[in-house]
């Protein structure tokens, strides 16, 4: 089995993005080192695989309502 080449997870609290507008949250996330930002509406069914370096935003009315890594 080979080692994964996934991106490291930044030392950043996903909760800091809650309440921000989608565009601003994505800009800040990339500046803080997140390699991937996934934006989904509430209730979206997602796969459960963990990806280091990915930040997930649940967005409603162009505002981040929930954020988590992986």
Image: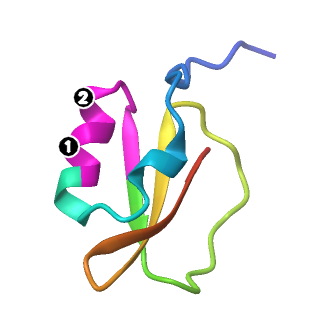
Asked if residue 60 lies in the magenta stretch, the reply is no
In x, y percent, where is residue 11? 53, 22
The percent coordinates of residue 30 (x first, y second) are 28, 34
Say above or below: 57 vs 41: above
Quarter of the rendering containing residue 59:
bottom left
Callout 1–callout 2 Cβ contact below 8 Å: yes
**Relative to the observer, which residue lies in front, 44 or 63?**
63
Front-lying residue, 33 or 64: 64
Query: Label 1: few (<14), some or many (≥20) within 10 Å?
Result: few
Residue at (81% x, 16% y) in the render: 1
Mark number displayed over residue 39 = none
Distance from label 1 to label 2 (Cα)? 6 Å
Query: Tag 1, which secondary structure?
Result: helix
For this view, does 59 lie left or right of residue 26? right
Q: Residues within 10 Å of mark 2 (few under 14, many from 20)?
A: few
User: To which residue does mark 1 refer?
Assistant: 27
Give the SS element for disc 2.
Answer: helix
Q: Residue 34 appears at what percent x and percent y?
A: 39, 32
Q: Horizontal placement of 45 versus 27: left or right? A: right
Query: Which residue is pictured at 56% across the width and 17% down the height?
Result: 5
Can you identify the residue that label 2 sits on?
Answer: 31
Instruction: Compare residues 5 and 63 and report the one nearer the observer.
Output: 63
Q: Is residue 55 left or right of residue 70?
A: left
Whether residue 30 is situated above or below residue 6 in the rendered picture: below
Looking at the image, which residue is at 61% across and 44% down? Answer: 70
Q: Residue 36 in magenta?
A: yes
Q: Position of residue 40 (x, y in %)?
A: 43, 72
Q: Magenta segment range?
A: 25-37
């Amino acid at each position: 089995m080979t080692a994964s080449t996934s991106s490291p997870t930044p030392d950043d609290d996903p909760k800091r993005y809650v309440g921000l507008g989608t565009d601003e949250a994505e800009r800040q996330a990339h500046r803080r080192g997140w390699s991937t930002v996934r934006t989904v509406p509430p209730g979206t069914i997602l796969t459960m695989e963990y990806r280091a370096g990915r930040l997930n935003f649940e967005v409603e009315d162009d505002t981040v309502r929930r954020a988590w890594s992986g």
